Amino acid sequence: MTSFPIHTIESAPLQSRPSLEALRGAFGFIPNIAGAMATSPVLIEGLVGLFGKVHGGSFSEEQVQVVLLTNAVTNECPWAVAFHSFLAVKEGVDEADVHAIRERRNPLDTRNAALSALARTLIEKRGHLGDHDVSTFLQAGFDKHHLLETVAIVAASTITNYTGNVTHPPLEEAFQASRWSAPSA
């Protein structure tokens, strides 16, 4: 397996440093996956810009974490599943709903279930939603702008999920209790 460096602000390429600084400001530390992404200034800058928009959108942080956790599970990225499991609970997602998402089931909360189902369907169908997929989401009380905003969240998390699956960053101690493995095929 190819090894990728986990950059610090000091070791990262100059162009990546502002993005790492921004992430440190947001999280209080630089997540290992961001340290791996910093190898490519294009990748880390793209992620930070898009995530800034996603986290400043019309969804609550709880709802954003439901989508991000669903995406991590659907894309089978162990680092991101652990990270977003931790953040989902921190942002108020019921632990039973976090557990359900980790098991590829919908949360009990109706709106979170609609968000999770839409996110999973977007990934599994590569964006080719059917009328039923769209109407089910809209019937849960969301608008069309929410559907398109979910596309942005899926795009942002795909960057992280794919990077995690390519670079295999070590899981930080703080997230060890949320460790996850993809089911065997």
Image (tube, rainbow, N blue to C red):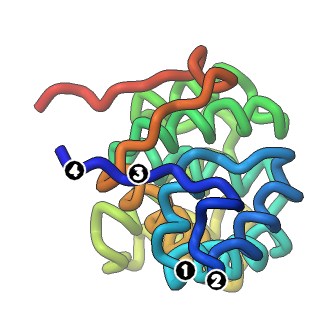
* Res 32 seen here: yes
Quadrant including the N terminus: top left
Residue 94 in percent (x, y) is at 74, 27
- Cα distance in 3D space between marks 3 and 2: 21 Å
Return the mark for residue 2.
Answer: 4
For mark 2, what is the residue? 15
Give the numbered dot on residue 164. 3
- Residue 161 or 139: which is nearer the viewer? 161
Q: CA distance from mark 1 to mark 3?
A: 16 Å
Q: State whether residue 29 is above or below residue 143.
A: above
**Front residue of this view, candidates 138 and 158:** 158
Q: Residues within 10 Å of mark 1 (few under 14, many from 20)?
A: some
Question: Which of the 4 image quadrants contains residue 20?
Answer: bottom right
Which circle marks residue 41 in the picture? 1
Residue at 50% x, 74% y: name it.
155
Whichever of labels 1 and 4 marks the residue nearer the N terminus, that label is: 4
Front position among marks 3 and 4: 4
- Which callout, 1 or 3, points at the residue further toward the start of the chain? 1
Nearest to N terminus: mark 3 or mark 4: 4
Cβ atoms at labels 1 and 3 below 8 Å apart: no
Return the x and y of residue 143 as percentages of the image width and height.
Answer: 72, 78
Q: Nearer the viewer, residue 86 or 171?
A: 171
> Counting residues from the N terminus, which is met first, the one under dot 2 or under dot 4?
4
